[in-house]
Amino acid sequence: MQLEYVGILFNDSTHRGIPSGKTGTESVLNYEGAANSFGLVPCYFRLQDISLEAGTAVAYIRNSTGYIKATVPIPRAIHNRAFYRDRGSLEKIQQLISRGIFIYNAQTRYGKDTVHHMLQEDPLIRPALPDTVRADPVSIRSMIQRHGDLVLKPCRGSVGLGIMRLCRGEFHDYFTFSRSSPSARGWRTVRLPKDKLPLLLRARIRRVPFLAQQRIPLAQYRGRPYDVRITVQRGLRGEWEVTGMFAKTSPPRTFVSNIAQGGSAYPAHDIFRDSIPGISPDQMIERTAEFTIRTAQSLSRHMPFAADFGIDAGITGDGRLFFIECNGRDQRYGFREAGLEDVWKETYRKPMAFARYLIETGSWPL
């Protein structure tokens, strides 16, 4: 097996922390152990470190004393772990791809509304989509009358920031929100006259696009609702595979399960066993995996060069599955929080295996 470089494309803050080992939720040691098993040497750089003219990149590489900067040929396979939205960056990525460089996960952020529309085209996934509309005062009032419980989420955003809930009671509506970041410390619920939208909600949906979405009656574990994060990736065969899954419960007095917002992570098998009577945990794992692979296949028809998704699925108490959202840059550390250390390391191994697949085959999988 020929030894060669695999590129890991980071944003500025993660790249800056490589020499000191302060890379946030990214584990460069996991990349290095995984890459070595496939005869690859990981090198870490930013998009601005690549010279199209010279065909080289200035990258961090590990040696016996630590990390050094070196000029290397642009690797044939590059795993993107950064967000790019400006036109210049996106054009540079397309230029690299046109030169035969495989940048997998070339785009890592898609709007929640865009993803919803993509999945609506799949007749097998469509029944698993919560009722969702673009949020405005008219649509919110219509949705709360229809469903009685709504989640309002920004079309672009992550880790649960900015999310709100509007719930209909017998005599009043109830609005749950947070003004702080992270939100877990600042949640409040206020009572409202029916159909009266609070000023904060109006201001937020006016400032940036929001979705109003039917809230799924999620199964509960120890009195707390949960959803499931499933990591699905392409590996050594180039096919979509479920690497692992864990359940996320919301903290007290909130409805958001994101770990960054105070949620807790648990092995999915244990949660299924204790929360879904009448269906074996193994059967729920299998159902969830099949659902997620189908979702990844459907999304990848619209997302060129996708190879790595973190998909959140909602599960009701009777075992029905619903799509909640998809993350193009799965942060992975939830597996470690759930005590699934081996699965956490496998989430780094799969992208390195896929790099070897791309180098060996010289083509993107069908």
Image: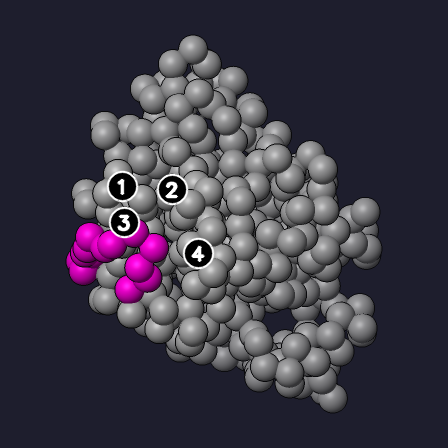
Label ID, residue 148: 2
Looking at the rendering, the stretch of residues picked out in magenta corresponds to 183-198
Q: Which residue is mark 3?
A: 173
Q: What element does badge 1 sit on? A: loop
The amino acid type, in three-letter code, at marker 1 is Gly
- Where is residue 102? Give x, y as percent: 72, 63
User: What is the distance, in whole Å, between disc 3 and disc 2 at their CAs?
Assistant: 9 Å
Q: What element does badge 3 sit on? A: strand
- Where is residue 207? Give x, y as percent: 42, 76
**Residue shown at the point (24%, 47%) measured from the top left:** 172
The amino acid type, in three-letter code, at marker 3 is Asp
Is 130 included in the stretch rendered in magenta?
A: no
208, 14: nearer the viewer: 208
Residue 182 visible from this viewpoint: no
Q: Is residue 57 above or below residue 189?
A: below
Count neighbours of disc 2 (C-alpha within 10 A) and say few if under 14, some if 14 to 19, many if 20 or more.
some
Dots 3 and 1: beta carbons under 8 Å?
A: yes
User: What is the distance, in whole Å, between disc 4 and disc 1 at their CAs?
Assistant: 15 Å
